[in-house]
Every structure is written in C-alpha cells, then in structure tokens.
Image (cartoon, rainbow, N blue to C red):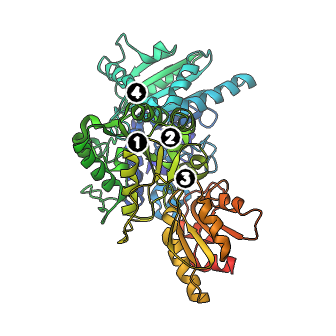
Amino acid sequence: MLLDTIKNPDDLKKLSVEQLDTVASEIREGLFNRLTKKGGHFGPNFGFVEGTIALHYVFNSPQDKFVLDVSHQCYPHKMLTGRAYGFFDETKFKEISGYTNPEESPHDIFNIGHTSTSVSLACGLAKARDLMGTKENIIAVIGDGSLSGGEALEGLDFAGEQTTNFIIVVNDNDMSIAENHGGLYKNLRQLRQTKGQCSNNIFKAMGLDYIYVDKGNHIPSLIEAFKKVKDIDHPIVVHINTIKGCGYKPAEDNKEIWHWTSPFNRETGERPSGSGENYNSMTAEFLLKLMEKDPSVAMVCPAVPSNFGFNKANRDKAGKQFIDTGIAEEHAIALVSGMAKKGAKAVFGTHSSFIQRTYDQLNQDLCINKSPATLLVNTASVWGMNDITHLGIFDIPLMSNIPELVYLAPTNCEEYFAMMAWSLEQTEHPVAIRMPCNGVHHTMAPVEKDYSRLNKNLVTQDGNEIAIFALGDFFQLGEKTADYIERQTGKKPTLINPRYISGLDTELLQSLKKNHTKVVTLEDGILDGGYGQKIASFYGADSMKVYNFGLKKEFLDRYDPNQVLKENHLTPELIWEDIK
C-alpha cells in the first residue's frame, strides 16, 4: 500500500497528484477496517478524506497548525501522521482515540470533542503567532452543522477583524448530525447553488475574504484552492462542498444514521439492533402521546434528536412540536425558558456533556426567571459516553447548586415517566430530570405522582445503625449493598431513594440520629461539590459518621466502567470494607 510509505505528511508530498486518489482509497479501507469492527464516526471521516489529503499535501504540519472542529473527522488526519496502525491493526485500535489528541502526536494541537470551537481556538494560535513573530499558517476546519454554535459565530466575528494569516475551511456537507437548522444554512445553500457567487454571503458580511470549491471531494480542485491561500496575509474562508459519507452508498443515502455507527456488516450495511427497552425510544413515545392531546407540548433538541428517540419518522409525527435548534444549546435553554414563560410545556433534552455549555443560560435565563421548563439530561453517568471530551459525570455539582432548579433522579422507568408527567403539568419550578443510564429497571411498587413537596426522600426499607442514600441509577447498587450488609451483620440497614438531587430532606436526616450511627451516600457522578457532601455537611457538628461514595474528580478517557467502579470502591463488598 502507498499508505505504508507515509509515516508523516512529508512522505505524502513525494507522491504525484494522481497517486493521491490511491491514498484516498486506502484510507477508506482503513476506515472500513476499524469502523466495521469497533464503530465510531463514519460520515464525517468518509466525507473529509480528500480534504485531509489536500491539506497535508499543501501545508506543512505540524509547523502549520490544523484545528479540526469537534475532531470527529480526524481519522484520515491520523492515518497521514503516523497512526495508520490504529486503523489496520485490530490489536492497536485502543491506542488511538476518536478525536485529536496531543498525547498521540505533535500534529494534534488540541484535545477536542465539543463542537463550534475550532475557529476560536485557531484564532488564539494565530494571535500568539503574531505576538511571537512567527510565520506559520493557521487553519481551522469547521463543518457538520458546527457553524450554528454561538462560539463559532463569535470566532468568525473576531476573525473578520484580523489582518494576518488565518484560513477557515468550511466543510459544507449540508448536514449536521441530522439535517441542518438555522438561517445561515439557507445562505450556505445559496452559495452552493451559485458556486459561491450569490450576493448574499455571510462570511463576507463578517469581514472575511472568500473562495468556493464546488468539488470538495476532488483532490486536484482542493489542492489548487489551498495553494492559493497558503501564506495569505489576511483571514479567508475556503468553502468546500463535500459529500458526507462519501464512498459508501448506504452512508451517502442515509446521512443521519451513518453520522456515527456501531460495528456493522460492510456488504449489507446492517448493524446489530439493540434489543429490549431503552429510554430514548420510550421518551419519544411518551411525548408523542402527550403531543397528540396537547398542542402546547413541545420537544426542543439541539442537534441530537435520535438520542431522545426522535428519528425522522417521529420528527415528522411531531411536526412543529419538535424543534431542532441546531448545535446551539445555549440558545435552546433560553428558548425553552421563553416558551415556558408563555405557557407552553417545553421539554429540552441533550447529553450531560453538552449541557455544560449552558450554565449561564440555566442560571440567568431559566432559573432566575423561574420558567417551568423540563430538562432531560441524558448519559449523565459512569455508564455514559467515555471519551475524555464527552464525560457525563460532572452534572450534579454543576446543576444541583443553581437556586430554583429542581433536579430529580429517578431510580426506575415508572418513576422517570411519573416525574416527567408531573414536571410538564406544574408551573412553579424549572425541573431537570437525570435519565437513568444503567438499563431499564421496572418496579411493581406504586410510584409518587406529585413531586411538589420538594426534597422529600422515599424510605424504601426501614432499618437501623446504617442508612444508605442511593441516588438515581445507583439505587440498584444501594439495594445490593443493603442486602450484602444484612447478610454480613444480620442487621437490616435503612435504604433511601433521595429522588431530589438539588436539596436535602432535613427532617429525615434529623430523625436518623435516633437509631443510626453511619450514613452512606452513593451517587453516579463526581463527589466534589456533589450530593453526598451536602449530607456530610449537614452532619458536620454531630457524631454521625458519613461515608460518601462516588467518582473521584478526574478526566477519564476511554475507560472501562466496571474498572472505574472498582477503583472508586463502588461495589457492595468494597463499600462494606470501608465502613465496617
């Protein structure tokens, strides 16, 4: 393979332009090898193979700096910078991440996994270059709907005022994860239809120079464009028209479901279907039934509709009651605050990792105004996404300490939907619900329908000496721990379902002093600033021993959840060893 001869981008430059098409084919073979066996981001990488080859053929990485937005299109870049082994050798798949990573290579400048950041990060590199008097090219790549993010627009606005070398490659495949949303994409469509010649041009309006490449998967056209802008003395946008999933017909025909894929059969395109119940599809079914009866119910989802069961068919069913804001979580929180203030029953949903971007809107736009919107927080768990850039374990300290926000932690399926039904009908509070992430657990016991008596915990088992507060999807761990302790001691612990993350049941805590000497807290998130520490603080002046179990504050990357649980003593046996 030609790819075997490419250990760094300098080796690529030794090839003829004609040979580069062969390199592209070999890169796609590497992508197929890894993705069919391991899964990962399919559409973004297949669509940017030629763009990556042309960039490395023209520019001089790592002296010239590439910043790839989200970096979920970085697989071809990794293959051209000495890491092809991570795609062709199955035993080495784990040695490279799915995102750019400076620990792997000097060709990766940042660890990036959140969207809309590349222009701002690259602006910083350019500003530092100018201050330090060096002359390298700075190239930001942005696409897959990332332009709709507020930080991307802020970065473009800043870039438009600069006067030195700065190159922004807009990888325009007419897609986000699902379809694009937002007025600026109308302009991108006009630019594509007119081959960059229409009078409306958002980039020029922001003070940026502009060129258009119609054949964004044609290497010679890309090389020609990149040579024109290399060493340019001012900011410019290179707008390239690419095909998401290029080179695999199923992905070209159904771009949404092939944005990311689990392992699949290359010949048929078939993937193992998830068996059994899941909260994503059940959430959509629940909301669609409500939407049929009540036109004021609406789901607002910033660009991740399938994570809440709103595939294309369900979006069509919901009609105007489903709103995709594009990759714009901050706007989406303010939007649902306004909708709720007007009387709509607005539901917002995204991943825990992504809701981190909305802190100011949660605080200012939603909670100060006490807008009764409902927020669904997905993958907030040690069992959620496990890349370092997508961790969902920081939400409890972030959200539970905002005044007026009621943050709920259901322990089973029936409780989850009861909490959502209550939240949609009440008009007093902004409410967030932490979607369980440890599988779908059912209960035969009746569940509470009214959660307006805030912070009232549910004692599910009366005991003495030891009380266990098992929050959310660690409740099943609490049940197992209570059972284990009883078998070890012959004494039944008290088991408590807190239900509320954002406040304490002080009456219950006070009553436990009568016949308990130890309190154990279990939470599926980092301990620092979390739920358990609030209980420890409550008992600070008392003789009650409090043991907080949760996750250490750290950045984890591509971890095994079971190993992390053991390291944090989150098994019944290790919990008992610590407290006995």
The correct choice, above or below, for 421 with respect to 570 in the image is above
Question: Which residue is the site of mark 2?
Answer: 70
Inter-mark Cα distance, 3 to 2: 14 Å
Element carrying mark 2: loop
- Whether the residues at callouts 1 and 2 have beta carbons within 8 Å, the answer is yes
Element carrying mark 3: loop
Depth-wise, is mark 4 or mark 2 nearer the camera? 2
Please tell me which of labels 3 and 4 falls first in the chain. 4
Measured from the top left, where is residue 542 in percent x and y?
76, 67
Amino acid type of the residue that numbered disc 1 sits on in the rendered structure: Pro
Inter-mark Cα distance, 1 to 2: 10 Å
Inter-mark Cα distance, 4 to 2: 18 Å
Amino acid type of the residue that numbered disc 2 sits on in the rendered structure: Val
Amino acid type of the residue that numbered disc 4 sits on in the rendered structure: Ile
Measured from the top left, where is residue 150 in percent x and y?
50, 29
Element carrying mark 4: strand
Question: Which residue is the site of mark 4?
Answer: 240
Question: Which residue is the site of mark 3?
Answer: 391
- Whether the residues at callouts 4 and 2 have beta carbons within 8 Å, the answer is no
Tell me the residue at 63%/77% (across/down): 466
Check the picture and name the quadrant holding the C terminus.
bottom right
The correct choice, above or below, for 546 with respect to 145 in the image is below
Measured from the top left, where is residue 141 in percent x and y?
50, 32
Question: Which residue is the site of mark 1?
Answer: 44
